[in-house]
Amino acid sequence: MLAFSSFEIFVAMRHITYRKRQAALAITAVGMAVAVSLLIIAVQNGFSDYMLDIVFKSLPHIIIKPIDGENYLNLYQNVIDGVWGLEGVVGVSPVLAATATFTHEDKVANAAMLGVLPFEADKISKISESMVQGDLNSIIGGKKILLGRSLAEKLDMKLGDTVHADFPDARDLNLTVSGIFDTGYASVDEKTSYVSLETAQVFLNEGNVVTQIDIKLNDIDQAQAVAGQISSDRYEVQVWQESNPEIVESLAYEKASNMITLLLIMVIATFGIASIMNMLVLEKTREIGMLMAAGADSSHIRKIFLLESGLLGLMGALLGCAMSLVLAIRLRSLQIEMPTGGMVDLPVILSYQDMVTLSLIALILSLAAGIYPAHIASKLDPVESLRG
């Protein structure tokens, strides 16, 4: 570990103050790089948290599905009773998913027909919060259906209209539209409908079966542990990361690409430090010779120049952290339109861990930028330096 004497610190600070303007530019460059990097990460963290919060309000944390080769879960109520006995479970919803061809007058569309128990399904997907017309519980006790807004528009349907549902090997049904929902995702609303579990079982004519059991937890981080308790050779258990790999991959890719961009920004900023250090070596050649003549050896000279570059990087990092804190507060007041609809404050999550990490990166890169100039300075010949 490098240890610096008071003499080395004094000389390093003297060199920095000697070129105040250039030092200020280098510190500002590093500071801006750190601040921009922190703000990019903060906005990314904010958006990730915001979108995951929305996603996990409408998606199960654990799914129980039939094993390979099976289409349905039989005796599913026994499984549900067992799951309810586990700590942390706040919702369990049996689902019978089918594909149906919907026809209304001359309009035709294929979409998923999800048979659910409204009260239980609402604990998982918060369907009631997405209802724009009608009521979720209206599908109980009758041949009623809820349509996504985009699907209803595609079929040119409104409340009270009758839609014909059929599919190969399924029973034909005439269903009355009793509600329309809007999740904010047109791709979902165009391909999704809800009926009662009983209606879906009549449609598929497979008896008292379901295709999956959705589970909601009070702590999503416990999904893996709870899934381990549910595990059985009679069915397959998936946690949310397995059932939604595209979400995990998308977030990981975004984070990786942003980190590469941020590192490039930091590397470019430290070139300013390298440039200043090289200029200092050229301008302070005579002083270096005098220091060597006074007893300073090559290791002292090397440490002086490394300390200079490190101090520039450290001051730049501290400036960047201060700038990011101020700018983050201002950014939070900005209103933006989210993909799900509606205006919200720009989500910004600036963590101290990110500040420490980027400050260390800035310091390391700054030290790296000073290695070559420090090496050149330490190899100067004292006699030639005094002459020069």
Image (spheres, rainbow, N blue to C red):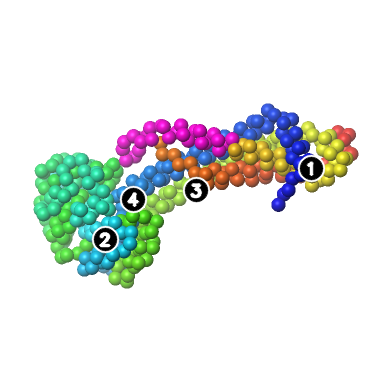
User: Horizontally, is 176 left or right of 31 in the view?
Assistant: left
Which amino acid does the dot numbered 4 rest on? Phe
SS label for mark 2:
strand
Q: Secondary structure at mark 4?
A: helix
Q: Which residue sits at x=83%, y=43%?
A: 296
Q: To which residue does mark 2 refer? A: 213
- In percent of the image, x 20 and y 40: which residue is there? 132
Label 2 crowd (10 A; few <14 / some 14-19 / many >=20): many
Of the two numbered discs 1 and 2 on the same chain, state the one appearing first in sequence: 2
Q: Which residues are magenta?
A: 319-345
> Which quarter of the figure is the C terminus placed in?
top right
User: Where is residue 163 drawn, in percent x and y?
Assistant: 12, 47
Q: Residue at x 17, y 57 (%)?
A: 197
Instruction: Name the one closer to the observer, 381 or 47.
Output: 47
Q: Are marks 3 and 4 in contact (CB under 8 Å)?
A: no
Q: Which residue is mark 3?
A: 256
In the depicted structure, whether residue 253 falls above or below residue 280: below
Disc 2 residue type (three-letter): Ile
Where residue 151 appears, as percent x and y from the top left, is: 21, 44
The disc label shown at residue 56, or none: 4
Measure the C-alpha gap from mark 4 to mark 1.
58 Å
Say if the magenta span includes residue 12: no
Secondary element under disc 1, as helix, strand or loop, is helix
| Mark 3 residue element | helix
Between 90 and 255, the one lying in front of the other is: 90
Density class for disc 3 (Cα within 10 Å; few <14, some 14-19, many ≥20) is: few
Q: Is residue 377 left or right of residue 349?
A: right
